[in-house]
Image (cartoon, grey):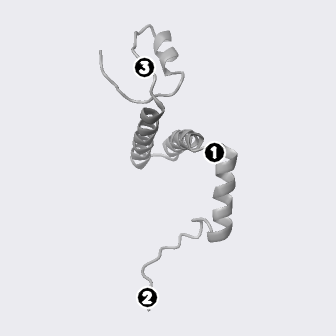
Amino acid sequence: MPAYNKLVRDYIPQIIEQSGKKYTTSNLTIDEYKKELKKKAEEEWSEYKEVKTEHEAVEELADLLEVVYALAALNGATPQQLEHVRQQKADEKGGFNERVFLVEVEDQ
């Protein structure tokens, strides 16, 4: 039986069961959950960097967003609150739509 030892989406055990396979899971403590969510974010980001198509990119970004929402919840924020903060920062500092690349800033 292959060992995965990683955080998975909530319905994965049922999907595995429906395929006729057996599995083993455990429930994480909050501290373990935080650690594993951070690892999952890194995993999803790595997968995004390897995509070949726009469709794959959107799929991986959706996975990454799901992890971001879970991390936000651990920090006491809803997706709506997260979006509000994102919008505030965009209003104050802009987004990344203009493709501005800062080369250097002169010291005084």
Q: Is 17 drawn above or below residue 88 in the view shown?
A: above
Looking at the image, which residue is at 59% across and 66% down?
A: 97
Marks 3 & 1, CB-CB < 8 Å contact? no
Q: Determine whether, in the image, residue 84 is placed left or right of residue 61.
A: right
Looking at the image, which residue is at 56% across and 38% down?
A: 70
Circle 1 residues within 10 Å: few <14, some 14–19, many ≥20:
some
- Reading the image, the residue beneath label 3 is 26
Residue 38 locus on image (x, y percent): 43, 42
Numbered circles on residues, count: 3
The Cα atoms of the two marked residues, 3 and 1, are separated by: 26 Å
Marks 2 & 1, CB-CB < 8 Å contact? no
Circle 3 residues within 10 Å: few <14, some 14–19, many ≥20:
few
Closest to the observer, 27 or 22: 27
Q: Quarter of the image containing the N terminus?
A: top left
Closest to the observer, 13 or 34: 34
The Cα atoms of the two marked residues, 2 and 3, are separated by: 54 Å
Q: Amino acid at mark 3?
A: Ser
Residue 63 locus on image (x, y percent): 52, 39
N-terminal of the pair, mark 3 or mark 1, is 3
- Reading the image, the residue beneath label 2 is 106
Q: Determine whether, in the image, residue 3 is placed left or right of residue 42.
A: left
The Cα atoms of the two marked residues, 2 and 1, are separated by: 38 Å
- Reading the image, the residue beneath label 1 is 77
